Amino acid sequence: MADPQQPPSSGSPRPLRLRPLGERVNLVQKEDFAKVLPPVAGFLPWFEALPDIYGSKALKRVVAAVVDARQHGREVGVALGAHVLKVGLSPLLIDLLRRGLITHVATNGASAIHDWETAYQGATSEDVAANLPDGSFGFWRETFAGLNGAAARAAARGEGLGLAIGRAILEADLPHRHLSVFAEAARLHVPATVHVAFGCDITHMDPELDGAALGAATQRDFWTLADTVGRLDRGVWLNVGSAVIMPEVFLKAVSVARNRGQLGADFLTCNFDMIEQYRAVTNVVQRPPKEGKSILAMHEIVLPLLHQALLCTAEARDCLQEPR
């Protein structure tokens, strides 16, 4: 019997073993997701009665800026970390997309995984601590096939990765596609881009992954993002729950836009996160914009407040769109 205190044999490694996703215990279920409400009577007076100090003052300013930007046809982009989708907030983001209050969604690769798994099975988020010791963490056959299949599709059709994922979910008629931000963005023809850092996502452990296809697809998405950022004058950019990847990607897109002679400093940014992070503050809030805000709160609390405040404010200004 092998001694459990000794390291595993250094001999030839066995082939990688994949497991069916249906065997996995998931920590997040669709039944726990946020519920979408229409504008709630009495919410706007309550929201406006919050103190004009610190976080609530910043949130009021962001809400006003987003509604004003959309009233005048300007860009409102949202960059997401994966935790935002993992805590059940996709229905609220989808509602904002349908109402035209978001014009671009940009995410990292982990967000795409959670989005696809939710569309596929109505659940996501494995127990990493439980699965890591035996090496089963991340090796899920259907997730690999769905996400890396979308990368191959993107290469074959000349699509960006986000669009390929969204269209693949729609064309496969996945049972919970109504909970997919990517599927809804594809349906609405709103840019949704995925900015992959190789080695960060479980799908990169797939021995069948075509790295060249994935790289080309995420590169197309970077240039799509750069085009949106180039139109960001007097618009709004929100960074929600991404500490490193999306702030870095946004900073490079700003540099591309300014190199093209497209973008000044007259736009508003806001970073939403649970703790203050260096790159999000410097690359999103401080360096690029004329005005930057930072709001520290749990995503599952502040984003429902933001969603309802946007709807009620737009309704009060008589510019709230019906969901498309």
Image (spheres, rainbow, N blue to C red):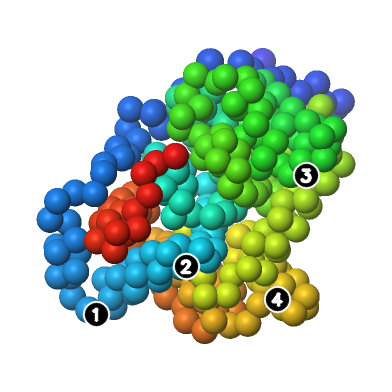
User: Is label 1 or label 2 in front?
Assistant: 2
User: Is label 2 or label 3 in front?
Assistant: 2
Question: Which residue is under mark 2?
Answer: 72
Measured from the top left, where is residue 216 in percent x and y?
83, 46
Q: How far apart are the alpha carbons under marks 2 and 3?
A: 32 Å
Measured from the top left, where is residue 75 in percent x and y?
54, 63
Q: Residue at x 57, y 36 (%)?
A: 187
Q: How far apart are the alpha carbons under marks 2 and 4?
A: 18 Å
Tags 2 and 4 touching, CB below 8 Å: no
Amino acid type for the residue under numbered disc 1? Ile
Which image quarter holds the N terminus?
Answer: top right
Measured from the top left, where is residue 20 in percent x and y?
61, 16
Question: Which residue is under mark 3?
Answer: 217
| Badge 1 density bin: few <14, some 14–19, many ≥20, Cα 10 Å | few
Q: How far apart are the alpha carbons under marks 1 and 2?
A: 28 Å
**In the displayed structure image, the side of residue 92 where residue 194 appears, left or right:** right
What element does badge 4 sit on?
A: loop
Amino acid type for the residue under numbered disc 3? Ala
What element does badge 3 sit on?
A: helix
| Badge 4 density bin: few <14, some 14–19, many ≥20, Cα 10 Å | some
Tags 4 and 3 touching, CB below 8 Å: no
Q: Residue furthest front?
A: 318
Give above or below for 195 relative to 168.
Answer: below
Answer with mark 3 or mark 1, whichever residue precedes in sequence. 1
Instruction: Choose between 291 and 81: the one closer to the eye.
Output: 291
For residue 53, which numbered disc appears in the image? 1
Question: Which residue is under mark 4?
Answer: 262
| Badge 2 density bin: few <14, some 14–19, many ≥20, Cα 10 Å | few
